[in-house]
Amino acid sequence: MAFLIQNGEIITPEGRTFADIYVEGETIAAIGKNLEVPPETEVIDAGGKLVLPGFIDPHVHIHLPFMGTFAKDTYETASEAALVGGTTTLIEMCCPSRSEDALAGYAEWKGKAEGRSACDYAFHMSVTRFDEQTEAQLRQIVADGTTSFKIFLSYKGFFGVDDGEMYQTLKLAKELGVIVTAHCENAELVSRLQQELLAQGKTGPGWHEPSRPETVEAEGTGRFATFLETTGATGYVVHLSCAPALKVAVEAKARGVKLSVESVLPHFLLDKSYAEREGIEGMKHVMSPPLRDVRNQAALWSGLASGAIDTVGTDHCPFDLEQKLMGKDAFTQIPNGIPGVEDRVNLMFTYGVKRGALTLERFVDALSTRASKLFGLYPRKGAIAVGSDADLVIYDPSYRGTISAKTQRMNCDYSGFEGFTIEGRPSVVTVRGKVQVRDGVFVGERGRGRMLRRPTLPQGGSDAL
């Protein structure tokens, strides 16, 4: 598998350049002009196109038992959808509940992916309780190369941890050199607000946001930052959705807390009016943290452009319409989540880069390179450099299309972005030197993906912080 990409403009966070890329085996062998290559080498013409490092989605749910049902994707469907959308590495949340054994859950999640994924993948290991067995189990999981944890300051009694468990998790993470990702809300406040709203007969999907308002997310973000500051651990806020929470995170960063911030695709483009629609139309857009007042979007775009928001994920979590209808009588019973792994790159390019909110360099950084640095994958992933994995996206900015559930590859019967136009899509996508996508069609090999075992953080935290 050797090929030469010619005539494209290479984009990295460091800048833009016109050069050719020679790929041999699974890695990039040479970058330059007028490269000498074997005569039988396949030539891919990238004239008029951008050549980008494969994108990394740092926050997906593929296998997820939740509210008595399961997310609809498999690794076959999710990885192919990701690749068609330009994402070549997935980092999945491994989420056994409080009642389940952590090691058994970890083995189950790994088993769902092994031999099935068309792209490379890694895991964040959720810590949903901390008891006498947890420390030894987490040490074993870290030794296996899963070097990031996930905690929920929400979903009381199911995924959520209390402050004591958060402290224990962070202390262990600091010792092991592990970054801790956190869903930042306040489980007690959410529970109380949900009960009050339901008692008042406020049961529709539009009441989901008032049950977990911006103040609750800001409080959770501040509490997480305080625990990081106290323990010296390294943290990462997932799916930050609103200006008050961002303000708290920026203030924590400014005083030296080792904290990074992720926002996810829906919060940049959708607002709470989508979830306030009647019936199933509103239920489609129920996620946590909820879609917010539209005024928050300007703060998110500005924070992303400046680097105050480090990364953009999806929190991809596909439940179909029948599953969403589980909550027809109470918003608390609607499975939380929205599909998005296929659409992230194209929508952020269209509404970020093309609309002037992001430079191409920051776009690549936020959707690829920064995550690779934070989660121990750089420079193997997220880079266009000699020796890096040949995960490459030849991107066609001249393509025009419209998002629709009728044409998506994700295993879900609706799209949260139905009717959104896109201005650009991947033309060619490679995974470790093998072409997996051409012109929007998966043409590659199922099962090519490998689990990425990652090192622990260097002393003092990630270089990306």
Image: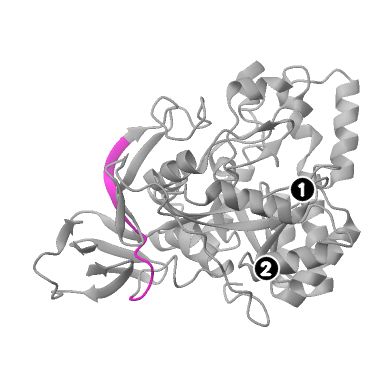
Q: Is residue 439 left or right of residue 379?
A: left
Q: Which residue occupies 74% across, 34% down?
A: 209
Considering the whole magenta stretch, tell me its main secondary structure: strand
Image height of 35 relative to 81, above or below = below
Q: Tell me the quarter of the picture where residue 37 sits.
A: bottom left
Q: Tell me the quarter of the picture where residue 48 sits.
A: bottom left
Residues at marks 1 and 2, CA–CA distance in whole angstroms: 29 Å
Q: Quadrant of the C terminus?
A: bottom right
Residue 409, horizontal then vertical, whole percent = 42, 34
Residue type beneath disc 1? Glu
Identify the residue under disc 1. Answer: 217
Q: Which residue occupies 81% across, 42% down?
A: 158
Identify the residue under disc 2. Answer: 142
Which secondary structure lies at badge 1? helix
Q: Which residue occupies 85% across, 43% down?
A: 156
Image height of 450 relative to 286, above or below = below
- Asked if residue 393 lies in the magenta stretch, the reply is yes
- Asked if residue 9 lies in the magenta stretch, the reply is no
Provide the residue span drawn in magenta: 386-400
Residue 138, horizontal then vertical, whole percent = 75, 64
Which secondary structure lies at badge 2? helix
**Mark closer to the observer (1, 2):** 2
